[in-house]
């Protein structure tokens, strides 16, 4: 879709008027707090337009004098009043079927309506129309006014002049003159009446001095149908050729034509050097030159307009660092209005429907496209069908009819499904994104995860949504703002004695709600919104108490411990340290304070499941000076642990805070200590002389039982062979704790022989000796037997020899 953007500044005539405009009026959004509700009973103010604005969509009649400008709107049945002292407009409801005449008499509005006469005291904003009576002439055919006096005329030539109290002025009461006979056009100034009679087809200009009862008449060529007197006679002349009526200026003394204009008003009034006309639903003001030769248009007093001082049915707005940006739908433009009320605009071929901004850039939404604007130029466009709304938080978020999209690179990626949501918004300095539907305010995080319903109700007629820093939701309807927070609500109604406000959009700026209205203005209403700067809270009273560890169920939430609902987030999958103590004010005992890592949050205890830490043992020593905490990060309750001091481990922390902590016992108390600040305590003692013994079975080659504990009925660890060497580790009453190879266990003392021979060994030795002795005896016997035999043999040989 191709769009042309035209960056326009004020035209030359606007620049000429701008200095005067700024001298009197100031937009001053930064100071709008002090200006809000300046009138009694008013709770909002119009911050743009600040000049030449009348809240009349269809002005019908106009009148003026030095002090007031009044406009009657027959559709609204309202009389709008603008004092000339630069104070704001105010209005009166006038419930009449038909108003035929409207004049100002000094500071009183005079109305001829429904066949009767009424006055309204313009100095009293609470005044109402009061029926009055005109006693003379007996019958009145026409009325006129010069802004101060009322002139009542009858066909027979009768004239009465009234002041603002409808008392006879100048003594002119039912004065009759032949110059005033007939159905003629009249105009008045002080005690003089100006008439435009016809005689024999000729037009005349008659000036009648009612005090002296004298008159002078001059022939004129114009067919005058209406007239008012100021510095000149401002008359409405009929042009026979076209049947149109244009304004002409005539000399007050002679009726001579001074100015012929191209002004063709629907209706008009004149006073002094000013001409007030109603043209194209606007009150246009013209000024007579000092030489009375020309009328020049000076300003347009209207509700809507396309100039730099008006809007035309704005549909959305956002606050920027420089002021406000308004989607001025009727003019197909974005109106950037700075803090001094100066407008520059961006004009498009297509109607902009929504607007938002980042710190540096403006984003404008069209029905099927979102454009990013920098330096008055479109720098990027995103195509997306059925755009509903846009907002910028950390990035651009776009609400369409089927869900929420976010800008990633050059694309819009859908992150959340929702149908027929009405608006999308976020809080300034906020955390989450909020959606307005017909039944609820939905809170989602930046990744599109639904967190909770921030509010619920019948929002089918709501037109916008704003969220403040605390998380209060301001659901805006056409005629009210409903503020909802934590199940409570209150309703605010924009009220003003001078304006009607039918809201079309809203956003927050500080503590004020800034809004656009169907009546084509930007307003501000102090709603007491909370900002980051104004938010205060009592620090949670976290003290020593019982605790437990827990992990979150699906969809469990973290609520901010500072009380900000806006800061709600999804619970993490980490282990939480839950303080098992009722939170003050939680009458239903639903919530608990908890630490997730070093952050203190509030949780709903039933959304979490307890987890048990693992038991640990052993003595540990501090590697440096550190602190023992009753509760981690609770610095108000710590105990100093000096380097080298010893603590006893009790348990781990079930994974809490990435297991940075260990639970230990120090003295009689239990504490948390950082695991990195302690290490296992090892006692370095001089090595003892090792003691050895041997298994001593009941029989040679028998087996000795080794038990798991010093009890013959305990579990059998192993059996060792009689005589096996063992190391004695510990001596008990009836048992030794021994080590055999890689096995450790308990053996009865009677089955261990320490530093000596066992019974089996002694028997073996004895047997060995016996065997040795027996062997020796046998050897000796054999030896002696053999020796004796050899000796006998030798004796026999010897005997034979001899």
Image (cartoon, rainbow, N blue to C red):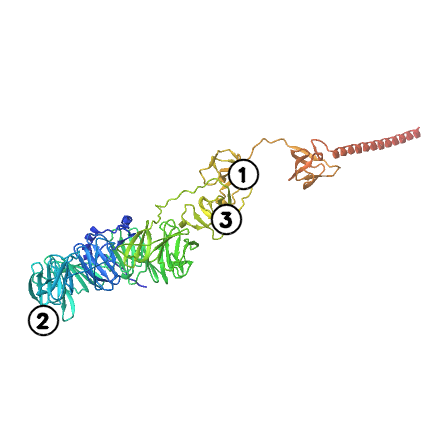
Which of the two discs, 3 and 1, labels the residue nearer the N terminus?
3
Could you tell me residue 415's position as x and y percent? 42, 57
Nearer to me, 18 or 117: 117
For mark 2, what is the residue?
A: 201
Q: Is residue 112 above or below residue 625?
A: below
- In the picture, measured across the screen, residue 505 lies left or right of residue 284, that is right
Q: Which residue is mark 3?
A: 551
* Residue 21 appears left or right of 213: right
Residue annotated with mark 1? 649
Residue 138: horizontal and vertical position, in percent?
15, 63
Residue extending furthest toward the top: 802
Residue 545: % across, % down? 49, 41
Asked whether residue 356 appears in the rendered view, the answer is no
Q: Does 697 sit left or right of 348 as displayed?
A: right
Mark 1 falls on what kind of element? strand
Q: CA distance from mark 3 to mark 2?
A: 103 Å
Where residue 282 sits: x, y (%)? 22, 61
Quadrant assignment, res 561: top left
Q: Secondary structure at mark 2?
A: loop
Say if mark 2 contacts mark 1, CB within 8 Å.
Answer: no
Q: Which is closer to the viewer, label 3 or label 1?
A: 3
Q: Nearer the viewer, residue 570 or 491?
A: 491
Q: Which mark is residue 91?
A: none
Decide if residue 267 is in sight here.
yes
């Amino acid at each position: 879709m191709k769009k042309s953007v035209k960056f326009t500044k004020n035209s030359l005539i606007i620049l000429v008027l701008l200095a005067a405009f700024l001298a009197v009026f100031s937009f001053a959004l930064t100071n709008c707090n002090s200006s809000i509700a300046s009138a009694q009973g008013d709770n909002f103010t119009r911050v743009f337009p600040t000049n030449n604005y009348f809240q009349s969509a269809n002005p019908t009649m106009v009148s003026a004098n030095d002090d007031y400008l009044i406009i009657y709107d027959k559709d609204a049945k309202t009389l709008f009043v603008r004092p000339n002292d630069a104070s704001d407009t105010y209005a009166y409801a006038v419930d009449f079927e038909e108003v035929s005449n409207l004049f100002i008499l000094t500071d009183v509005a005079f109305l001829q309506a429904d066949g009767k006469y009424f006055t309204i005291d313009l100095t009293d904003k609470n005044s109402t129309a009061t029926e009055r009576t005109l006693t003379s002439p007996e019958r009145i055919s026409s009325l006129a006014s010069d802004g101060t006096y009322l002139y009542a005329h009858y066909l027979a030539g009768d004239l009465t002049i009234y002041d603002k109290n409808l008392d006879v002025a100048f003594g002119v009461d039912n004065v009759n003159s032949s110059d005033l006979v007939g159905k003629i056009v009249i105009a008045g100034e002080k005690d003089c009446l100006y008439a435009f009679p016809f005689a024999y087809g000729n037009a005349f200009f008659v000036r009648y001095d009612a005090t002296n009862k004298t008159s002078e008449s001059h022939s004129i060529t114009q067919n005058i149908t209406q007239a008012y007197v100021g510095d000149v006679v401002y008359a409405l002349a009929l042009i026979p050729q076209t049947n149109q009526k244009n304004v002409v200026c005539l000399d007050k003394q002679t009726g001579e034509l001074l100015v012929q204009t191209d002004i063709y008003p629907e209706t008009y009034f004149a006073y002094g050097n000013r001409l007030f006309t109603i043209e194209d639903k606007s009150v246009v003001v013209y000024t007579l030159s000092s030489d009375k030769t020309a009328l020049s248009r000076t300003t347009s007093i209207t509700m809507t307009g396309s100039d730099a001082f008006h809007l035309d049915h704005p549909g959305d707005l956002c606050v920027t660092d420089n002021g406000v940006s308004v989607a001025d739908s009727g003019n197909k433009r974005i109106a950037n209005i700075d803090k001094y009320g100066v407008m520059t605009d961006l004009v498009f071929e297509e109607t902009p429907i929504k607007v938002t901004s980042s710190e540096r850039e403006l984003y404008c939404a069209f029905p099927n496209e979102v454009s990013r604007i920098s330096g008055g130029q479109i720098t990027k466009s995103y195509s997306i069908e059925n755009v509903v709304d846009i907002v910028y938080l950390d990035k651009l978020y776009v609400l369409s009819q089927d869900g929420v999209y976010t800008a990633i690179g050059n694309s819009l990626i859908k992150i959340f499904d929702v149908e027929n949501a009405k608006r999308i918004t976020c809080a300034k300095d906020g955390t989450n994104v909020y959606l307005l539907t017909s039944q609820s305010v939905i809170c989602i995080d930046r990744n599109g995860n639904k967190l909770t319903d921030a509010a619920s109700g019948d929002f089918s007629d709501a037109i916008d949504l704003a969220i403040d820093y605390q998380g209060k939701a301001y659901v805006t309807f056409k005629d009210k703002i409903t503020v909802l927070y934590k199940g409570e609500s209150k309703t605010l109604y924009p009220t003003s004695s001078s304006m009607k406000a039918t809201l079309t959009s809203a956003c927050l700026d500080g503590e004020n709600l800034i809004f656009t209205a169907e009546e084509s203005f930007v307003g501000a209403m102090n709603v007491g919104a909370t900002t980051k700067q104004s938010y205060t809270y009592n620090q949670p009273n976290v003290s020593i108490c019982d605790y437990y560890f827990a992990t979150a169920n699906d969809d469990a939430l973290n609520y901010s411990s500072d009380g900000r609902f806006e800061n709600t987030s999804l619970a993490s999958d980490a282990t939480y340290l839950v303080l098992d103590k009722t939170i003050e004010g939680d009458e239903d005992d639903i919530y608990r304070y908890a630490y997730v890592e070093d952050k203190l949050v509030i949780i709903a205890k039933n959304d979490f499941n307890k987890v048990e830490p693992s038991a640990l043992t052993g003595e540990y020593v501090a590697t440096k000076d550190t602190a023992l905490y009753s509760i981690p990060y609770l610095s108000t309750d710590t105990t100093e642990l000096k380097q080298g001091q010893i603590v006893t481990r009790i348990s781990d922390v079930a994974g809490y805070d990435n297991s940075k902590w260990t639970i230990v016992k120090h003295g009689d108390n239990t504490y948390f200590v950082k695991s990195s600040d302690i290490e296992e305590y090892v006692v370095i003692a001089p090595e003892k002389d090792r003691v050895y013994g041997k298994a001593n079975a009941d029989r040679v080659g028998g087996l000795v039982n080794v038990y798991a504990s010093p009890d013959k009925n305990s579990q059998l660890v192993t059996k060792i062979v009689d005589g096996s060497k063992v190391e004695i580790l510990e001596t008990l009453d009836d048992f030794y704790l021994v080590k055999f190879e890689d096995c450790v266990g308990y053996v009865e003392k009677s089955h261990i022989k320490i530093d000596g021979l066992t019974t089996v060994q002694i028997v073996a030795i004895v047997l060995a000796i016996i065997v040795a002795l027996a062997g020796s005896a046998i050897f000796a016997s054999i030896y002696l037997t053999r020796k004796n035999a050899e000796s006998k043999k030798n004796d026999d040989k010897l005997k034979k020899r001899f």
